[in-house]
Amino acid sequence: MTAWATASLLIVVTPLLGAASGLLLWGHPRMLKVWGLLVAAASFLMTCWSLGSLPVAAGAFPHLLLLPLTAFLSLLGQPAHRSNQPAWLLSLLLLGFGLGTFVGEGPLSLMCLLLVLALVGLALAVHHVFPGPAAWWGIGTLGCGVLSLALALVAPSPVSSLAFLVGCAIALPLVPLHHGYVAALTALPGNLPAFLALLLPTLGFHGLEAALPELPDGPAQAAAGLALAGTLYGSLKALAQARPAVLIAYGNLAFLSILWWYLAETRTAPSPAAVYLSAVGLAGSGLLLAWYALCARYGDVDLRALSGLARPMPRFAVALSLLALAALGLPPFGVFSGLVGMLLAPSYAAPGGLLVIVIVWLCASWYFFDLPHRLLFGPERATLRHQDLRGPEAASLALVIVILLMLGVMPSRPIESAPAPLHPTATAEFPAWTK
Amino acid sequence: MDQIARDIDMEARRMELRGIVRVAGEVIAPYWPMRTFVHHNPLHGLEYLPFDDAVERGAQFLGGRGYLAGDLYRHYFRIGRIHLPHLEEALRPLARDEHVIVGPCRIAHREVLRACLTHGLCALPDEPLDALVDSGPNEDLVRALADYLAPVLSAPTAREQMAAAVKEDRSSLGRCVTLSSWCDRTCGTSIVARVNDEMVKWCEAFLDEGHAGWAMPGRERGFYIAWKSLAAKEWSPCGIADSRRKIAALPERPEDAVLESLDLLAISHELRQDYLSLQLTALPGWPAFIKWREERPNYVWQQACPISLVKFLAVRLWYERELVQQVCREALGIAGTFPAVMGYMEQRSEAYFLRKERATGRLPVPYADLVDRLARWGDGWTEAVDRLQTEMGPRRDRAFRLTAARRLLALAQALGIVPTVLLESAPEHLALLARWMDEFPESAHGPVWLKAFEAGYHDQLFGQLMRTSSLSRTSERERSVPVRPQSQSVFCIDVRSEPFRRHLESTGANETYGFAGFFAVFIRFRPWGKNHETEQFPVIMRAKNEVREFPRSYHDHMVPKHESRTKLVRAGHTLLHDLKENVVTPYVMVESLGWFYGLPLFGKTFFSAWYRRWTARLRRLFVPPIATTVTVDKLTPADTEELVAAEQRAIIWKALRSELGLHGPRVSPELVEALRRQALNGDGSLTSQVPELVQRTEFSSEALANFVQILRRRYDVNPRSASRQRERITRTGFTLEEQVFTVETALRMMGLIRNFARLVLFCAHGSTSDNNPFESALDCGACGGNAGKPNARVLAGMANKPQVRARLAKNGIEIPSDTYFLAGQIDTTTDEVELFDLEDVPLTHRKDVARLLDDLREAARLTSQERCARFPDLARPLSVPQAVAHVRARAADWSQIRPEWGLSGNAAFIIGRRELTKGLDLAGRVFLHSYDHREDPTGRLLEVLMTAPQIVAQWINTEHYFSTVDNEVYGAGSKVYHNVVGRIGIMSGPWSDLRLGLARQTVMNGEVPFHEPMRLLTVIEAPRAIIEKLITRHELLRHFYHHEWVHLAALDPSDGAVYRYRPTGEWSRAIRCDFLAPDR
């Protein structure tokens, strides 16, 4: 077995084995959480160690590193409660399959992506007490994704290519295939929404990156049109939300649609696009973690039931405010630098969409500011028992902010796509439009 | 005939409505415009109710809290401001003679109540349903206790909650909740906020008093008509469809519009008063100012732009009815009327309950989604409630028991019981303990805490007073021949005078007196060079005399120069203002003149005191100050005629020069007089005498006739104007009788009727601050929010008149011939005292004045030092020179949010001789009014004191009280967000209600009150029988004392003991608690 194959195998197997062995600790939430953290850390270290020998382009490095890191951070702030145990183990499984999508070869990679979507859909179906239309739509969309990817595995081109594109559009949400992403971020328990906020788009982007050069004009233009519609749709939906998780999900949808539009328009994925994607996903993760910290204290309450948290929860207030600034795309965080980098890239020559981007930005500056505004200010609720962020919660949010800051200020050269690798990469063997 | 009957009926309905609105408006107190800020009780209209009931009404209508938060009282308890014996005493009426056995311990009901107060057991929050985070170290014990309580404690079921909610809401609809609030609570809409926004917009524009660059058109037609004409031009305000047609179809009269809206909403007659109160209190600030305007029909802006509460309600109710109908129709499928809403609550209770739970955010997310679906698509509300109970019931039970367990655990800790003992007692006993705690919620603690808090201060003050009262009686007996003091100074009763008086007395043989700062001089005052008058008397009084300020004759030659320079300065200010406010010019102005603003910016920011000194010096250099005098005497009719004629002659002289170019020897006095008479008496044509006089001029008769017309029209030299002038002059000044009466009243009331010093100073007070909209709040409340300088000058002027003294002597007040009355004013921000009219001081008294000035300066320095010790931003005590410099810098600092901070802290009002309080450090918390009961055997003077200065003190006290206990509702909020609006008040941010009350920074020091909120304690040194007689005579006093708005105590001269006046009308002797030492 070659070095890259061994490294790939280790990276994928570590979290999967970790998840399996975690079952032994079932019933001991504190120990299970520590175990999950250890596995995620080990996965991160292993990825770092084998980064040079992996069969992936340099542009994918940030994602490879961010996936275990995000899994770690999302687990770190979790309260040791029995109800969270399934989510933790599922996170490790998803991490394994997610990394497998990156490092696996052609069908294996597709299979991993398929499993990720299937697991998320399954979790949605199992978790929801009485699924509403949103959850049903989500389960349906994810099921559609699973079928598409299965079709991509077996069907000939161009059906397989189209099916693969649909699978990618479900992971990296593109209207009208966004329901799976929205449901995953809003209806799943524990740390899963925060982790999936980064994992799903990253996987979709990775698949799309490979498919872009061969994407015919028709589907590309259609995708660009849908993406532009998605930006507006996501923004409007986010504006109308009273529930933070849904607001964050639709806000992310709007920002990720910008990425879709950019990719479809330019047919390239420059390094700032990867930065942008990572930052949008991570900012969403951070916001979901912050919201989860509240849910852990007050239950899954309505935004209307909370206000005036700035005084009793100062650490939370600072973290939430910074995350909101990062999520809406203000400097010096990654979303801003990623977007500006994309727009300044030589491949970009379509200023037509700028107006839409400005609208998205304006809308985001309303709803992402409104969220901390409503939570932190206003009358303090005396009937609630306030407790500021505990150490691990504060640490996880602080680290998310630091990473967002690093994404915003770090030079892009190290993650510029290198010349074609010597090894046959996974991306090179994705289904083609013409065979 | 039918038409006539209908008209009569309609008019009767209008009258009835106006009456209802007047009563409905009682819940809001009038708001005085900012420039004459008057402290007042925000619940003034409810003083006919007991204090606690009024507080409840305030909560019902305004949503305001009437007591401090429990945590703050607990803070006071911890630091020793509230004492346990007082708390026990206050708890006694609530405690029952019951107990519970818990393990080996016996817990009395009283102990549980006390623990609830001191440990905040009832403030413990409810347990969230799905919390994942552990909240404390005793979590296992809490869970065990919760399980232990399972057989005896369970949460109310969803249906029980629903029935309770429906019952409560049905009874409160119309009384505590408007239909718009009901819609907001049920459907999650924001009708109230939208209507408020609209009302802020219209009120702000309509009530503007010259602040806006572009005034609202049509204001002269009144608020309702102006709104009607403008709102009809708006496109769908608040999303109201077909608004133009609807507004156009509204009745012409506001009363009819209100009645129409009430009829459309189907508000029954018995509910209308409360309903309208709720409408007014939904946005209490603007209606409070409208109420003030309505009560002053002669107010110039009210005459120009009439507005009333009825007009306000006519507009507000239109928005409400339209939006309520829209929401009820679209969201609930019912009519937007009171009966329909009541019916909905009763017949569709499940839907109502779930919608309401959803709107208030109390439903877990999956159920919230379910409610949303049901609201959109159909029925199934009953099943949803059942499902909620089935699925959430056990979790609610668990949370309920966990909450009870936490409280019981906290109770055990508070009582010093080992927590595990709880598990050894019967669950029923624990449930009883939990019920006792539930029966005494945090919201019921306020009255108990307040009583205990007040009792502590009362004991402290009584202790101090009893210490001196016996001494003063002893010294009185010993001192048969009174010693003549070096000076006597009369200060305002204001609490800020107390430290100054104390220090002035300590500097030498200076006696001080306290008297309401208007010194019994009811005047409207017009300063020289100003076109408006200030009302220099308490707002509850009226004045008939006017006083004007004139330059002294020896400065007459400087008057033209002064006037022209003043005009120049004003023109400059106006120009700059116009340039700044214009639509276009600011763009150019910022570039061209913006730099010049740098100097004031840096000066005011970094060198505030220095900057102020130098700008004042420059101003004096450019516009030299002129010595003035005030018109004390009323002119005789002949003098009045002469004065009017002299003024007219001066005008004609000027007019001849400017209109005809005639001046010098060509203008003879005869000519001027002839023209004057012509203008006053003639019809415009020249009499035969005039042409003869003008033969020496080159003007034709026609030209002169024309000139006479110009005099009449342009220069106001006409009979009507002359009559007006005469009338104004007859109001100016006082007759000799009035002067004698004023001086005698003042001297008798303050007890200064013998042993006069060589110098008697009437010291008014004012203040200096920069960038402070609340500036007038620092001035004299007894002078209507103005500085009291004119009053002091007028009284001193009267008292120095030999004729007045002669008449006073006949009335028994012998003022020695060597006694001289001075007028002065203390600046309460810098503590500097300025004396006026020193030109008139006889030579024989110059040295006395110099010595007094030295003492005043020393007292000012010591007062500044004492005041600086109270500023929390000063970490260390300042030396005297440092303190003096600091208070001056503070007064000039435009970023200073507390330029003075002297009035906060007020707590008591003492009416009595100075001997009672002399030598006591009352910490600037006490209003001191001098009064000698021996000179008032009938209680006539005391009656005035109890019904006038006491009211002012009570207003100041309650304003501070309510602004402290709930600054957001009764106060003005943080100064940080204040913006001046319409030159009448302030708003928070760019768009809000008119903010009433005091700013947060005035009453709070960070999170802790700087002003300790307690009701006024009045201590009167007088026989109890006289006080009782006065209370019986005045309903207002009965309201004060029987309803506990003010506490009363008497220092009975017969035995020197302090007696408390109980709300029941009985006296009880106050017993001094020796364990309490003054600690502030």
Image: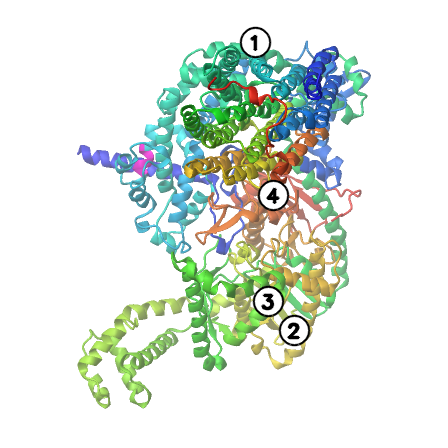
Return the residue nearer the eye: B1010 or B517.
B1010
User: In the displayed structure, does residue B516 sit left or right of residue B665?
Assistant: right
User: Tag 3's secondary structure?
Assistant: helix
Secondary structure mostly seen in magenta is helix
Bin the neighbour count of mark 2 within 10 Å (Cα to Cα): few under 14, some 14-19, many 20 and up. many
Say which chain tag 3 marks: B
Q: Which residue is mark 1?
A: B390
Dot 2 or dot 3: first in sequence order is 3
x and y percent of residue B980 in the render?
48, 52
The reply to whether the C-beta atoms of the residues labelled 2 and 3 are less than 8 Å apart is no
- Amino acid residing under circle 2: Arg
Identity, as a three-letter code, of the amino acid under mark 1: Thr
Query: Do discs 2 and 3 belong to a common subunit?
Result: yes
Name which residue lies at 45% across and 78% down: B561
Q: Secondary structure at mark 2?
A: loop
Q: Quadrant of the N terminus of chain B?
A: top left
Q: What residue is shown with label 2?
A: B758
- Compare residues A235 and A72 and report the one nearer the observer: A72
The disc at residue B589 is: none
Could you say where residue B463 lies in the image, as x and y percent from the top left? 75, 47
Amino acid type at image mark 4: Thr
- In the image, is residue A9 above or below residue B965? above
Whether residue A149 is visible: yes
What is the CA distance from the residue labelled 2 to the residue labelled 1?
Answer: 90 Å
On whether disc 2 and disc 4 are found on a single subunit, the reply is: yes
Q: CA distance from mark 2 to mark 3?
A: 39 Å
Chain letter of the residue beneath label 2 in the structure image? B
Percent from the top left, x then y, of residue B787?
54, 61
In terms of secondary structure, where does tag 1 sit? helix
How many angstroms separate mark 1 from mark 3 (CA)?
Answer: 74 Å
Return the residue at label 4: B964
Mark 3 and mark 4: Cα distance apart in space: 34 Å
